[in-house]
Amino acid sequence: MNLIEKAVRFLEYGDVEKGLSQLEKLSQSVNDEEKFFIAHSYYQFGFIEEARNLANILLERYPAESEILLLLAEIYIDLDDEEEAIQLLGRVSGTDSEYPRALILLADLYQMQGLDEVAEQKLLQAKTLKPGNPIIMFALGEFYSGRGNYRQSIPYYEAVLKDQKKIGEINVHLRLAECYTAVGRFEEAFTQYETGLEEQIEIDSLFGFACAAYQAEKYKTAIQKLLDLKDLDPQYTPLYLVLGKAYEAEELLDEAMKTVVEGLKLDDYNKELLIFGGKLSMKLGDVEKGKQLLESAYELDNESLEASYLLTRIYMKEESYDKVVPFVEKAIENGDEDPQMIWDLATAKKELEEYSDALNHYRSAYTFFKDKADFLEEYGRFLIDEGLIKEAINVFEEIIKMDQTRYDIEEMLLQLKI
């Protein structure tokens, strides 16, 4: 082990002062190749200023040396001096063997500046120079997945896996699994997660694996992976919703409810978990508990259409019409009303004796339910009560067209036409 390696070893073991002191002394006497090694070591251990100063000295002597240009560019990127980094990378010759690496760094810089098209061009240029190079393929995969173009990123990650499982500290199997999941290829995602997690356990990837298993209807596997995740980190709150749904899919409703309760103890502001818990409670026959959870969800987000819809259905069954109206009117105000909620509003307004409003809402609901006999019957009877006989006749005739065995409606029509 030479003197430089000994000095670097001091940095590795935390004796920073001694390591820096020795490297400083050595940098005054060693040759330029060793100086570059020291500059690179400074950079690796986060001593950016020392790295920059020594690398700049070397650059004055070797202004076209690509290794020095690339090291300095990375240093200036860390110093948030993107323009200087771009200028340095622009000095790397197009015939230099390190030019593709310079193009990758340039792509990162242009992407940071929001110039995605330029970044893409640089990466594709690097790919042309070194076809099939796993680093470049991985960079393209990262570029497209970072922009949400998962389908486009998949072939690049697949190409990387022909040669390498990892790039740096990144597990490519897990990256590919995320992309498969994003495009709905859950079976393939499942396989990639399984392989990737054999190499290393990552909390987020374990959760992704469980989600892919759930989507692939492998509920038992999803449950097991989520329980493994829970053992590793019980504070990982997203797991509770998926675990509850997986238990529900296996008809383990009590286990699902216990999971909801556990999750809400950790995060009682989890709207999705509150809504799921509300639906699950009603499925278990505990309407009051369901209503309580849904009302909590609605308090967190009064624009939640799902919470509004479910609460409206509960209040309609309870005939709590005064509670129905504000929920539906808020949904309409937000532009998210559900057709069933418009019908519910019409019924509620009728029961509250707000007949003019009820008529308007029945007419709106008719657009959606003109083929639904029970709606037409309710609407027709309301029209009769309002003295709108001609409209009522038209509505009842629609029912007869759908079902000629409705003799009760035929009799009513005969009386209306007298």
Image (cartoon, helix red, strand yellow):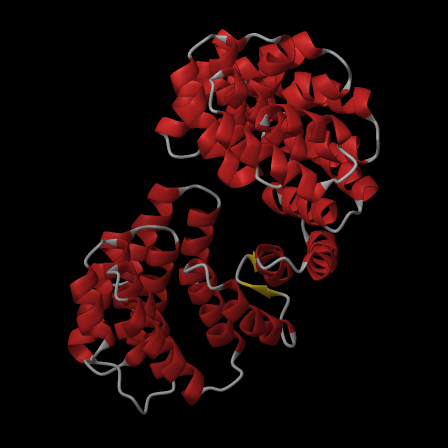
Residue 385: image x %, image y %? 52, 15
In the image, residue 12 sits, relative to residue 36, either above or below, namely above
Counting every numbered tag in the picture gives 0
Residue 326: image x %, image y %? 42, 15
Side of 416 where 247 appears, left or right: right
In the figure, residue 8 lies in which quadrant?
A: bottom left
Q: Nearer the viewer, residue 175 or 59?
A: 175
Side of 31 where 53 appears, left or right: left
Q: Residue at x 48, y 44 (%)?
A: 13
In the image, residue 351 sits, relative to residue 40, either above or below, namely above
In the image, residue 1 sits, relative to residue 304, either above or below, namely below
Side of 187 where 274 appears, left or right: left
Whether residue 265 is visible to the viewer of this picture, yes or no, is no
Q: Nearer the viewer, residue 152 or 66?
A: 152
Q: Nearer the viewer, residue 23 or 272?
A: 272
Which residue lies most toward the front here?
A: 418
In the figure, residue 224 lies in which quadrant?
A: top right
Side of 82 where 257 appears, left or right: right
Residue 172: image x %, image y %? 60, 62
Residue 103: image x %, image y %? 33, 77
In the figure, residue 107 lies in which quadrant?
A: bottom left
Q: Nearer the viewer, residue 52 or 256?
A: 256
